[in-house]
Amino acid sequence: MFRAGFKTLSFGPRCSLSPGLSDCRHHCRKTPTKVRVSDALSGEALGGDVTVQGWVRSVRPQKENLFFHVNDGSSLQSLQVVASSSLNNTFPTFGSAVEVRGVLKKSPHPKQPFELEAEEIEIVGECNPVDFPFKVKKKHSPDYLRQFPHLRCRTNFFSSLLRIRSEATAAIHSYFKEQGFLQIHTPVITSNDCEGAGELFQVEATCPQESEDRNFFSVPAYLTVSGQLHLEVMSGGFSRLYTFGPTFRAENSQSRRHLAEFYMVEAEISFTQSVEDLTKVMEDMFRSATEQVWAQCAEDVDLFHKHVTPGHRETVEAMLKNKFTAISYSDAIDILQRSSEDFVFSTDWGCDLQTEHEKYLVKHCGNLPIFVTDYPYDLKPFYARDNRGHPQHTAAAVDLLVPGVGELCGGSLREERLDLLTARLEAAGLEDTYSWYLDLRRFGSVPHGGFGMGFERYLQCILGIDNIKDVIPFPRFSHSCLL
Ligand code: 4AD
């Protein structure tokens, strides 16, 4: 019978040059091939002498053999290691980090195609399973996992999420590259409040400044709420641009769809004709990224669809199959007013759509994504294009609403007409602050527009995850900044 232990183990044959050594890496061995767990599981290096490194996900001692599973984050499945009892009488514990050398063989068990027959096991990092917050075979809830942001990458739920997040990032970059968009690194520190909502984090040096000037940058500086204005600067010379980076909002919200730090994908397109030029890119990007994630992370996505949100796969498949519909804000208000739902917030024309309204509209439209266009002018920031000539005063702005989440993307055509933009900035007392923005309209202004998509909300949408804090490695929100 095996006994749990924490010391380094070695089981190699005796060295002919140094007979005192049972573990001779210097004279006796060809260097084994290092393989990732995912490669081992696909049969790479079958029959060969290999080394696998990772963390122990389960341990099953039996009379003849010790079975344990090793995972290195490269796949959802772990690799089964079989260690004969003749090797040693100590074995790695659940949670410990190990390096196993052995021969990769076909497994006699139908559940796994290949397994590693151990010849040498090294415990790289011990783990006391009694104190380790995760237990073998126990299904821990996302709420529980959230308490351990420093350890949750060791669970199936969170490692799947991180692989999907990484693939979705790559898929979004691929989409824009294929469509001829140029990536711009917009700044994290900025002196403007793009959305004008005043939800800013100010940036200051912690060390005292030598000069009289109190501000490190000589002007108040903030963490960016959006890269839009910097993209607009560059759209004076490039017709298709995007940026994908962290954005920050000091919203005092604990909601399931708000973070203080989140990632935003933003695109800016020049020479636009209408809002449809934007909605087409939003829809194509959503489809292309989701299809790539589906194809590349099938097992990980399945984990969510089977065990976390059963039935969500069908919802996403319907989103991919059907063309997204579009309704105007005025039509949306009409639908809300005719509904029998008891809304908490007002549904009068001119009111902003709240989450309850957005979710209702999505359900009303067949639980499929919908674009809502032409919002009241006064609801939108200074940059939104005035829909002159419409019966009500609206701006050429558009939001994409999706099942389960509500608003996924927000965008607009930008006001490219100097006189209208000047008048709006003057009315807000912002014409000096944004004199450089007015210059963009003075020197070769073109009709243009763009949008931003909240990346965490995108992940919530495709995976059916209820709480935004479960789709980002280190969630930041009011009264919480762990690690
Ligand atoms: O609608 P928003 O505020 O649009 C802008 O910032 C524009 N300047 C973008 C542009 O046109 N380039 O934000 C865009 C998206 C929202 O639709 C939402 O998905 C996400 O960003 N978002 C948040 N995600 C998580 N936490 C928050 N606090 C968020 N605020 C907005």
Image (cartoon, grey):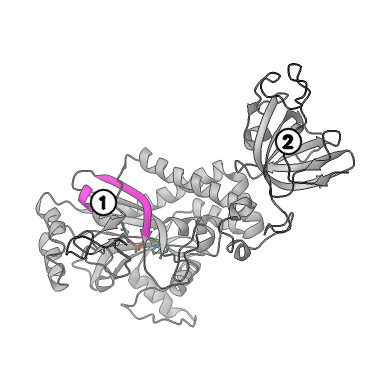
Q: Position of residue 222 (x, y in %)?
A: 29, 62
The reply to whether the residue tagged 2 has its Cβ within 8 angstroms of ligand 1 is: no
Q: Amino acid at mark 1?
A: Leu
Q: Is residue 429 magenta?
A: no
The reply to whether the residue tagged 1 has its Cβ within 8 angstroms of ligand 1 is: yes
Label 1, on which residue? 231
Residue name at image x 12 percent, y 68 percent: 423
Q: Which image quarter has ligand 1?
A: bottom left
Quarter of the picture containing the N terminus is top right
Q: Position of residue 424 (x, y in %)?
A: 16, 69
Q: Position of residue 344 (x, y in %)?
A: 45, 82
Q: Is residue 91 above or below residue 194?
A: above
Q: Residue 427's quadrant in the figure?
A: bottom left
Residue 108 visible within the image? yes
Tally the numbered discs. 2
Q: Could you say whether the residue bearing mark 1 is in a helix, strand or loop?
A: helix
